[in-house]
Amino acid sequence: MHTFARRAGFAGVVLLLLVIGAFPALAQKDTLILAVGGENTEGYDPLLGWGNYGNPLFHSTLFKRDATLNIVPDLATKRQLSADKKVWTITIRDDVQFSDGTPLTAEDVAFTYNKGLEAGGKIDLSPLVKAEATDSRTVKLHLSQPDITFVQHLVTLGIVPRTQYGPAYGRNPVGSGPYKLVRWDEGQQLVVEANERYYGHKPQIKKLVFLFADEDAALAAARAGQVDVLGVPSNLAAQDIGGMRLHVVKSVDNRGLMFPVVPDEGRTTPSGAPIGNDVTADIAIRKAVNYALDRQALVAGVLDGFGRPAYGVVDDLPWDNPAVRFADNDPEKARAILEAAGWKDTDGDGIREKNGRKAEFTIIYNAKDSLRQGLALAASDMLRPVGIHAVPKGENWDRIKTRLTHSQVVVYGFGDHSPLEMYKLYHTPGPDPMYWNAGFYSNPVVDSHLENARSAESFEASIPHWQKAQWDGTTGFTVPGDAAWAWMVNLDHTYFVNKCLDVGTSQMEPHGHGWPITANIVEWTWTCD
Amino acid sequence: MRLSADDKPAEEPEPLRRSVLSSAAGRLARFAAAKAVRLALLLVSVATLSFVLVSFSPVDPIDAYLGPSILKVSPEQREVIAQRWGLDQPPVERFTRWAANLLQGDFGTSTIFNEPVLTVIVKRFTTSFWLMFAAWTVSGVLGFTLGLLAGAYPASPLDKTISFYAYLMASTPTFWVGMVLLTFFSVHLGWTPVHGAWPAGMAAHDVSLMQRIHHLILPAVTLSLIGVAQIALHTREKTIDVMRSEHALFAMAQGERPLAIVFCRTLRNVALPAVTLQFASLGELFGGAVLAEQVFAYPGLGKATVEAGFRGDVPLLLGLVIFSTVFVFTGNTVADLLYMIVDPRMRRNARKGDR
């Protein structure tokens, strides 16, 4: 009996060792394993939206943004806007090949833009009418109206080869970017290798493996030493993972309170959602909220220090207006503003009233998002001492978007590398309101600044107009002006990076998906042996 | 009388055999036809019901598809997307078109994978199959054995241990067991991988059988640990019942040991509910796989189902519903067929045409 047990035990151990031994270590220096989320289940097709936040990795774009977000040439050597500001003439390099060896010509660029118009993906190329290649190196993009924000497409839309493009392209993308896709095991991993035909700076890291796992599994893999770059939400950043260091990247991924700025007059949207809120329609309430919030405390308390206060929607971007900064955490000022506007606590319950209406509103947040919940709760606490009763309430995201957003204060997150977002958030909305400018903010002066910015003759020339829309000295949508929103924080994006990996200086990251950390991947170096 | 009786014997065997044969074939044909009609009715109702349910879903497929890109897209572009997916048609029109395509074997195109639904299902099912198969076999065999043992010695320490374990597992959520195992074996001990169906960075065709098994162990164990419970508990009950029956008592009186009685004299009786349960559990296996695959990031059918639901991929969701209906239905049919083999009474009843 004893010998049998011993033999069985021995056999078990041997079997176990065999199984474990079959799993070799993966420590090759030129291969990096990244768990930064972002599997594009529909494939890596730029025309369906791959890379619309920049850096398509497998593709190159006409222009790109450098570390400080300036627009610099990539595929293109120069761009020129016609006198009527409706035709872009773009000259491209003549030494570029796709990873399969076919040369990249202006025909491919024109094909990409024309096809992108009709592909029905996540990119919206309007106001483009058509693209035409006038010779092998020149392409003309015809717009229906002047729009400088079209530049964003020049920076983000990856060029596809016209001879290879088809329905299955997303699973076998051939491009001219620094890397090429080798294999994609859906739901599991994506393997890419350096593209030896890449015309730019050749990356030192020859092979990348992107792991697709949810938060817990990715963290577990990193703890087990199987991951070199791990993206984590900031509430998981305050820990030690053996062999890795924390890499914190600034972002314009912001969170703020959207106020309905029109009173409730019984109006509804075409789909029946109520419009307006009598309390937040009062500018005094909106300003008081902005001054009463202690943004530094929100960063420290809710973001664990991984972030910075937000005063506008475009903080620290090239088109940000620094004049809109103000001193917050000022309950005295908030109280004074409310008193002056006639909001007084007459019944002694700690909540102010005006004309029989209490200074009361609900702060709605996506119930699945613990960060937004934390912000809503903390903001509510900060408003109580000035006499504003803000009730935090978690809701289903779909209900927020379809039913609540036009009549309630909602915690939203925005932040993009294109000022077009600012336009959409603050320009007077059309008849069918969308998710942006849900509060029906409207100011004709702001509208005209925003329109002037869009129709500027160059991106540089548009910047002063964008800044004036925020605050032009007399009006604007930021706190000195109409205080249409109360922006609270800009998040930091947090990564754990192998101690042996130098990831250089990361670009300020936008809100959204994709792999923003890989923007400068050609500069990454392995520093150990 | 005698004369006719004398006449007959010479001829009798032929027509008798023929009638037995033809009646066997007829029975099988009747069985198949009845099943086919039921399957058809089931599929029609499941498809209709799912379509109605899905059309009431609060998830807007275009919003879900766009995600944060929603801000980059104008109403005009949304219409282009709706056209690509046929969402610009009214629901009834969509349903009839979908059903007509389905009859021709076209399940449509998955919106989130941008691939034919059937391709997605086949791809994912091949990964899931081994996980489900391993879990199903292990939990069946192990559960049945444990149930027999517990039933053979009711109220003994062995029975108490097995019952305790079974009750514990029957009331434990799959994903939780998965997390505990993952934390202990993969993170703490580092014995098993945390992620995927094979090692990171390797190509599918380079992966050895050992590596696949290595990645399969933990999810399969998770599913088996849970799956054992049901079947063990039912088998235990049935075994105790049968042990009280007259033929078991008689054997006992003759001095046979309980284990011998269980294995030699009651196996057939006990096997019936076990077989039912084992094949009926295919549905649960599907559900369990959804959770286990989610925890272990195992890229199978379960994970695809979750994504399709969350992201409003109607064609894929409906395809999966149809697929799982057929899958579970097949399981039940196999159980019906096995009954006839295991239980002679059912064979006899079927012959009489009672069923």
Image: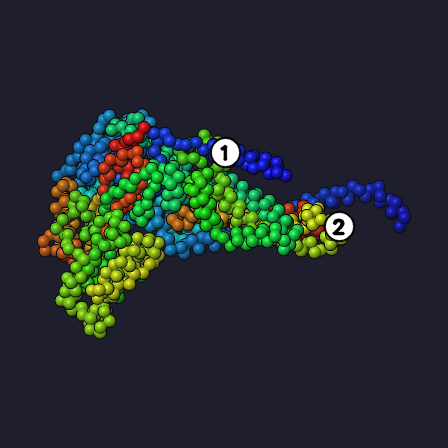
Q: Chain of mark 1?
A: A
Give B107 or A22, whichever is nearer the viewer. A22
Q: Residues within 10 Å of mark 2 (few under 14, many from 20)?
A: few
- Looking at the image, the residue that sits furthest to the front is A2
Up-down relation of residue B50 to residue A212 (above or below): below
Q: Chain of mark 2?
A: B
Q: Residues within 10 Å of mark 1 (few under 14, many from 20)?
A: few
Q: Position of residue A425 (x, y in %)?
A: 22, 52
Residue under pointer 2: B255
Q: Position of residue B263 (x, y in %)?
A: 68, 46
- Looking at the image, the residue that sits furthest to the left is A473
Up-down relation of residue A406 to residue A233 (above or below): below
Dot 1: element: helix
Q: Residue at x 27, y 58 (%)?
A: A378
Amino acid beneath label 2: Gly
Q: Residue at x 74, y 42 (%)?
A: B18
Residue under pointer 1: A17
- Looking at the image, the residue that sits furthest to the right is B2
Instruction: Give the quarter of the image for residue A126.
Output: top left
Q: Residue at x 27, y 28 (%)?
A: A202
Q: Position of residue A116 (x, y in %)?
A: 29, 39
Q: Residue at x 18, y 61 (%)?
A: A331
